[in-house]
Amino acid sequence: MIRKIIFVFASALLLTSCGAKKRTATKKKGASVTKSSESRDPGTINPSNDTETSDTYVLPKDSGRFVKFPIANTQEYIETFAEIAQFEMRAYGIPASITLAQGILESGSGRGTLTLKTNNHFGIKCHTGWEGEFDFHDDDERGECFRKYNHPMYSFRDHSIFLSSRSRYKFLFNYRRDDYKKWAHGLRQAGYATDRKYPQKLIALIQRYGLDKYDEEVVRNGLATVREPKNYEVFTHVVEKGDTLYALSRRYAISIDELKRLNNLDGTNLSIGQVINIRREREVK
């Protein structure tokens, strides 16, 4: 089962990375989806739409079944994306129940105007660094730019990267990975959404549809419920000509936000000879 979803995921990523880049946009007005308090911009992957696009999605757990979009109802949304959410839980430690509940809430169970146009299930906006396709949609402001994907799984991956790479969400990963209630309240505490009832809405969806069973299944199959302490190495880098925070973040596998925090930087400008502190997880051999 796991091998199938990994194969589908890896194959799609490989095909996407091989395509030539292009940018197109169609500016349309649409109904707003659930709003969040900040613009989510993972900026770590570039799933452009240059591969062959299909209006069907092969369920990993049944390669003979296809689901036509738009999805009919919430239960079908869950059946379609539960295994993707579990894959993300194994890779990043975010409860599958939380990912599914957020997807249901923010995409209208996959039937929202933005989601239907872009396969964007979590309202991820374009911002600097996005080189894939995009579309415009009315959200906090009129005609905002949102990322467009050739497959919904890339939206799920962007969601995982966003939560795991932002310092404000780090405390969430100290919770038990099957404690969806703490995660729901923690997201609101960290400023993910402006809606005061956001945690209650997530919890209600999880309990109504029994989404916590997907967390239990992942944990039962070997994922530790509590994150193991990480062993870090700390060193410095002397800035040379051509160095940027983005380049350093890619080189040393550390987020730009973490680099700025470690070095008390307000902006992104660097000067030659400047000493930059680096902290990264030590490889276990």
Image (tube, rainbow, N blue to C red):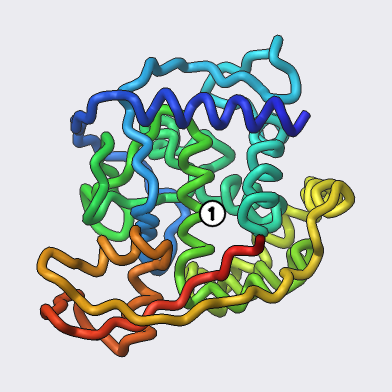
> In the depicted view, which residue is nearer to us: 64 or 103?
64
Q: Residue at x 69, y 76 (%)?
A: 229
Q: Quadrant of residue 237?
A: bottom left
Kindly state the secondary structure of the residue where label 1 is placed. Answer: helix
Tell me the residue that label 1 is attached to: 160
* Of 49 and 196, the residue lying toward us: 49
Decide if residue 260 is on the left or right side of residue 177: left
Position of 186 relative to 285 (above/below): below
Q: What number of labels is visible? A: 1
Examine the rendering and report whether any part of residue 97 can be seen: yes
Residue depicted at x 60% and y 70%? 197
Residue 118 in picture, x, y percent from top left? 37, 34
Is 272 on the left or on the right of 177, as rendered? left
The three-letter code of the residue at mark 1 reads: Ser
Q: Position of residue 75 (x, y in %)?
A: 72, 34
User: Residue at the spot x=63%, y=14% of the render?
Assistant: 66
Residue 187: x and y in percent read 57, 70
